[in-house]
Image: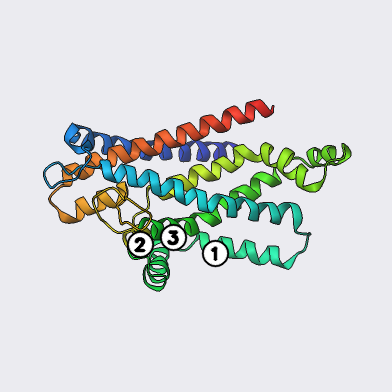
Amino acid sequence: MKSLILRMAVKLSALITMIVLAFVVGFVLIKGIPNLNLAMFQWKYTTENVSMMPAIINTLIITVISLAIALPFGIFSAVYLVEYAGRGNKIVGIVRLTTETLSGIPSIIYGLFGYLMFVVALGWSYSVLAGTCTLAIMILPLIMRTTEEALKSVPDAFREGSFGLGAGKLRTVFKVVLPTAVPGILSGVILGIGRIVGETAALIYTAGTVTGVATSLFSSGRTLSVHMYALLSEGLYTKQAYATAVVLLLMVIIINGLSSLVAGKMASKRN
């Protein structure tokens, strides 16, 4: 009887989740698709076309640079925690507590930190570099935790077999353990991309809201999410904001789909 109740509760929860997701996606598509037009994809933003093309380019630039900064630190930190730090190491406990704490901090706090640290203290002003460094710090705990779990899921038999064939610790980690854990690491990357693309609060205080394409790391530029927020806050371009939401949703779906496809192919090759 208890198992039947639990099974029904699980199915009901899954059904409610699917309904809510379908409602949100459907609402955005219904409101946004009719307002899409070619003028919104012109290279230069004006008050007439309210183009989102500069924001799309800025979003891609900030996403790539943020991942380029956060991925090496996150992956190598996880490798140290799982493969090199001894059991019972106090540093491991402190690092894990710190990463869990950082994961729960609201993004607006990261934005204020980035503003005070990068914009004011380092004098970078509102710039892509300030925004990407802030986002890299924000997604670093997420990448660390997912990479750590992915490394833990690799069977010890793989490591023992590598050692038995005469491979050293470093070669075992980079030739055996990390390639096997790639699908799990990519899951963290997908989550990190989703958080970067959808982030607004942290970027308003660091990257700024300039409507043009950022010409350098020290230039200001808005992302798609900031662009949508700016349109809604002005109150004059509500329809265009819905159209921007459609493009943002499609961008996240495409990026996640491609990442999942790559992870699936890598997992199949390993098997």
Looking at the rendered image, the disc whose residue lies closer to the viewer, 2 or 1, is 2
Which circle marks residue 42 in the picture?
none
Separation of residues labelled 2 and 3 (CA atoms): 8 Å
Label 3, on which residue?
A: 134
Foreground: 120 or 244? 120
Q: Residues within 10 Å of mark 3 (few under 14, many from 20)?
A: many
**SS class, disc 3:** helix
Q: Where is residue 86 in the image (x, y as percent from the top left)?
A: 78, 59
Q: Is residue 173 above or below residue 34?
A: below
Q: What residue type is labelled 1?
A: Thr
Q: Position of residue 191 (x, y in %)?
A: 49, 45
Foreground: 219 or 260? 219
- CB under 8 Å between discs 2 and 3: yes
Q: Which of marks 2 and 3 is nearer the N terminus?
A: 3
Quadrant holding the N terminus: top right
- Quadrant of res 39: top left
Which residue is at a point 42% across and 50% down the rendered structure image? 196
- CB under 8 Å between discs 2 and 1: no
Taking 196 as reference, is 181 left or right?
A: right
- CB under 8 Å between discs 1 and 3: no
Q: In this view, does 100 lie above or below 27?
A: below
Q: Earlier in the sequence, mark 1 or mark 3?
A: 1
Which circle marks residue 206 in the picture?
2
Q: Which amino acid does label 2 sit on?
A: Thr
Q: What residue type is labelled 3?
A: Thr
Label 1, on which residue?
A: 101
Separation of residues labelled 1 and 3 (CA atoms): 16 Å
Separation of residues labelled 2 and 1 (CA atoms): 22 Å
Taking 46 as reference, is 23 left or right?
A: right
Q: Is residue 139 above or below residue 108?
A: above
Q: How many labels does the image show?
A: 3
